[in-house]
Amino acid sequence: MTHETRSVTVALDGRAYDIVIGRGVLADAGRLIAERVAPPLAVTISDTSVAKLYLEALQRSLEAAGVATRSYVVPAGEGSKSFAELERLCGAILDDGLERGAAIVALGGGVVGDLAGFAASVLLRGIDLVQVPTTLLSQVDSSVGGKTGINTPQGKNLVGAFYQPKLVLCDTDSLDTLPRRELLAGYAEVAKYGLVRDARFFTWLEEHGPDVIEGIGTARAEAVERSCRHKAEVVAGDEREQAGRALLNLGHTFGHALEHAVGFDERLLHGEAVAIGCVMAFDLSARLGLCPVADAARVRRHFAAMGLPTGLDSVPGFAWSVEALVDAMYRDKKVRGGRPVFILARGIGDAFISREVDLDAVRGLLVEAIAA
Ligand SMILES: NC(=O)c1ccc[n+]([C@@H]2O[C@H](COP(=O)([O-])OP(=O)(O)OC[C@H]3O[C@@H](n4cnc5c(N)ncnc54)[C@H](O)[C@@H]3O)[C@@H](O)[C@H]2O)c1
Ligand SMILES: [Zn+2]
């Protein structure tokens, strides 16, 4: 069974790596890992949900390619991105013996990728890492760019490392088993790339978005490839998030504040918050006279057509407070010099960074959003 695959290179000096994308990539993972990373041992880390679905196939493929395997499974869910789970995991891996040439293979969504990636960065002071993302969000965002880490009681992702993988394998068929709500949440990050820097891609998504969700033809591979190309370009230009990488936070200043207010629970998935946040960022841009009102309307229309939330009514019965949201924006780790960073837009595909946003305009927008 050979399918056509696509490849995107993340061009980092001396640490360049490929993202291989397509149907059936998982079945070929062993060969790809053996050829490009050549570890004597692959230490696979997965979560309980993903392990049931894909771990056996991955291990079989690795062993067929002559790579010895071991696997560790963590509980599914954000709770696994913790010091406690990291300690358990590293302890178990070291108990079983670990040599320098071994590679960590992260099989799962962003939770597994962030945790396993961080473990790879600290085990023996750093061993090879392969990402095998199985959610749309992780295929287009978290597996690419080298951010790894865990959460602490002080906040999300406050402990971690920049640690680039040696290879990323995105099997678009693995998204078939992903709950639709998770798929849609990941789709918000896909659309975000179009909104930030690729108007043609956004127009393509307006036509083919449903095919991406349903897995029709090559739409998913196309969308994952284009998204990864954007992330790769931005990361290669700005690995440590000084400027360019911040553009990819479109919708995230509002989004994080919403997630924070709700308490980061399943009433509002990250991608759902990003969808609402992108709508708000475009509405704010239009309100400030920076962006055509028609573009803001298009963003809202597309997300709504896809079945993504576009407003605060998506969390039924929740008592939103303007001050709590503004407060959360000021407490965000991306606040510099006392002012939150907003990603605004001059139009679809043309986002820019602003630290000058008038808080009254933000308040006004939130008041209307809560009333709507
Ligand atoms: N490192 C980065 O740059 C970066 C970027 C964005 C997000 N993140 C992190 O990513 C995490 C969110 O990632 P996520 O949305 O992938 O969540 P996740 O890893 O929790 O996966 C979502 C759920 O889907 C299940 N699942 C995964 N793949 C599946 C499949 N193919 N079929 C069926 N079920 C499957 C998982 O078990 C889980 O229950 C957050 O912790 C966030 O902080 C990191
Ligand atoms: Zn995000």
Image (cartoon, helix red, strand yellow):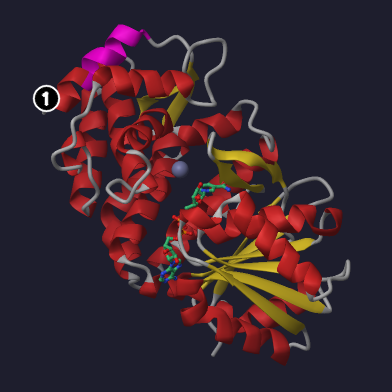
Q: Residue 149 appears at what percent x and percent y?
A: 63, 47
Residue 318 image position (x, y, % from top left): 18, 36
Q: Given the current orientation, which residue lies at the most extreme right position?
A: 100
Determine whether 364 is above or below 307 in the image.
Answer: above
| Residue at the image point whose x is 22% and y is 24% from the top | 293
Tell which of 144 and 48 is nearer to you. Answer: 48
* Residue 223 in view in this figure: no
Residue drawn at (49%, 73%), measured in percent from left and top? 48
Image quadrant where one finds the N terminus: bottom right
Q: State whether residue 350 is above or below residue 194.
A: above
Dot 1: what SS? helix
Q: Is residue 270 left or right of residue 292?
A: right
Query: Where's residue 73, x and y in %?
Result: 58, 72
Count residues near mark 1 (Cα–Cα under 10 Å), then give few for <14, some for 14-19, many for 20+. few
Q: Quadrant of the C terminus?
A: top left
Is residue 184 something one can see in this rendering? Answer: yes
Q: Main secondary structure of the magenta part?
A: helix
Residue 362 included in the magenta stretch of the image: yes
Q: What residue is drawn where x is 73% and y is 49%?
A: 163
Q: Quadrant of ligand 2?
A: top left
Residue at mark 1 = 371
- Tell me, yes or no, whether the highlighted magenta stretch contains residue 75: no
Q: Which stretch appears magenta?
A: 358-366
Please say if 59 is above or below 129.
Answer: below
Image-based side of 195 in relation to 165, left or right: left
